[in-house]
Image: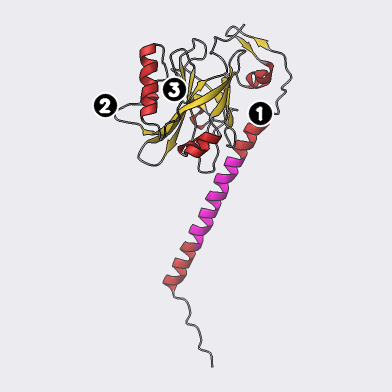
Amino acid sequence: MAKKKKPMGIGSKILLMICLIVFCGSGFYLGSYFYKAWKAQDEFSQLTQIDMDLNDIRTDKGTIIGKYAGMWKENSDIIGWVKMEDTKIDYPVMQTKEDPEFYLHRSFKKEYSDSGTPFMDADSDIFIPTSNWLIYGHHMKSGIMFHDIVKYEQQDFYQKHPTFKFDTIYKGGQGTYQIIAAGYSKIYNEDENVFKYYQYADIDSKERFDEYVAGVKSISVYETGETAEYGDQLVTLSTCTYQTEDGRFFVVGKRIDAKQKKPEF
């Protein structure tokens, strides 16, 4: 004769209920997280569907090429577009000098967004231009935003993808960038005497340029065989990483298709 199972005690029932609540809560959180990531990615994809056949627009800062004119009409904070092959990185780049981190948690439409929108450091300037344009993006676990720049920790990925694209929205600013360095760093205390790549968003002299190139190459995870000289335009992509507290990963590229010029009128 089969033995009767003992009824579940109150303590076991409570524990089971807690486990079920935690399981359901975790599932809801993960579902919500990835839905938000999908929605954010979809919104960026829709930007590329905006009328691409508009005429150039002449502004007091320069001539916006027709490809980006529709986006600029929707949000004049856009200053460029970054794209890396075989990654999800294909995004607008924003800049708000009066509120430098405005897009840290805002979408292109200026609505709240966990993933934010890539944005350029307030000290970088595409109009002067400064010699280094520092661009930030979140490292999202869903794989969107700048998550994929960490693929450049692998030298074989770099060898297959040695360049990336960065366009300013202004005529003359569409460029291909050869990667010269990629590596891990962190946000250091002010009194720590170490190289801090994130303090070079405003390079405007040969001394600072040479110092920066030597610095990023010294902490690159591998030797690319490429370097840069004053007069080259640099773009630095930066994202958070978790190898240490306040960890960062960066990729530095130099423009190789042409020398950077001021926006054309």
For mark 3, does the 10 Å Cα neighbourhood hold few (<14), some (14 to 19), or many (20 or more) residues? some
The magenta region covers: 20-38
Amino acid type shown at disc 2: Asn
Q: Residue furthest front?
A: 225
- The numbered mark, 3 or 1, whose residue comes first in the sequence reads 1
Q: Is residue 196 above or below residue 14?
A: above
Residue that mark 2 sits on? 193
Judging depth in this view, the residue of 7 and 185 nearest the camera is: 185
Main secondary structure along the magenta-highlighted residues: helix
The image quadrant that residue 12 belongs to is bottom left
Mark 3 or mark 1, whichever is nearer to me: 3
* x and y, in percent, of residue 45 in the image: 65, 33
The residue positioned 26% from the left and 26% from the top of the image is 193
Q: Is residue 125 above or below residue 158?
A: above
At 67% across and 32% down in the image, what residue appears? 46
- What is the x, y in percent for residue 227? 44, 22
Label 3: which residue?
227
Q: Is residue 27 visible?
A: yes
29 part of magenta stretch: yes
Label 2's element?
A: loop
Q: Residues within 10 Å of mark 2 (few under 14, many from 20)?
A: few
Residue 189 highlighted magenta (yes or no): no
Of the residues shown, which amino acid type is indicated by label 1? Leu
Question: CA separation, marks 2 and 3?
Answer: 24 Å
Question: Element at badge 1?
Answer: helix
- Which label belongs to residue 144? none
* Marks 2 & 1, CB-CB < 8 Å contact: no
Which is closer to the viewer, label 2 or label 3?
Answer: 3
Return the mark for residue 47: 1
Give coordinates of residue 170: x percent, y percent. 60, 14
